[in-house]
Image: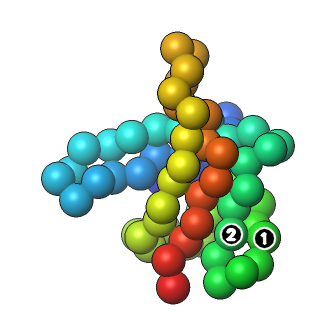
Amino acid sequence: MVKPGKNRVFVNDPGGFTFDFVVTPATRITAGGQRLKIADLASKANQQVTVRYIPERKGDIASSIQLRQ
């Protein structure tokens, strides 16, 4: 699930646990080598992703989100 207005991305792991990540202007979002914006992720629901993040007290900051093809 994606909430572009709140700069949040929610990802479910294979066990069904949900992780939420804060997306910043520095977050690199890609799919098939193309750069995407957070709003583009809304149409890509239910696809597998790899998220690299920095743990923070205020929430995990996504440094990169890569959609798998």
- Circles 2 and 1 in contact, beta carbons < 8 Å: yes
Residue 5 visible: no
User: Total of numbered circles in the picture?
Assistant: 2
Q: Position of residue 10 (x, y in %)?
A: 46, 46
Query: What colouring does the structure picture have?
Result: rainbow
Please tell me which residue is depicted at 42% across the width and 70% down the height of the picture: 48
Q: Which residue position holds label 2? A: 30
Please tell me which residue is depicted at 78% across the width and 70% down the height of the picture: 35
Q: Residues within 10 Å of mark 1 (few under 14, many from 20)?
A: few
**Residue 31 position (above or below residue 66):** below
Q: Position of residue 55 (x, y in %)?
A: 51, 27
Q: Residues within 10 Å of mark 2 (few under 14, many from 20)?
A: some
Instruction: Specify the farthest residue to the right.
Output: 25
Q: Is residue 63 left or right of residue 52?
A: right
Q: Which residue position holds label 1? A: 35
The mark that comes first in sequence, 2 or 1, is: 2
Please tell me which residue is depicted at 32% across the width and 43% down the height of the picture: 18
Would you identify the image quadrant in which residue 42 lies? Answer: bottom right
**Residue 58 position (above or below residue 66):** above
Residue 1 visible: yes
As shown in the figure, which amino acid type bears the numbered disc 2? Thr
Dot 2 lies on which element?
A: strand
Instruction: Specify the farthest residue to the top.
Output: 57
As shown in the figure, which amino acid type bears the numbered disc 1? Arg
Q: Position of residue 31 (x, y in %)?
A: 64, 76
- How many angstroms separate mark 2 from mark 1 (CA)? 5 Å
Please tell me which residue is depicted at 17% across the width and 53% down the height of the picture: 15
Instruction: Specify the farthest residue to the left.
Output: 15
Q: Position of residue 21 (x, y in %)?
A: 53, 39
Q: Is residue 20 left or right of residue 22?
A: left
Dot 1 lies on which element?
A: strand
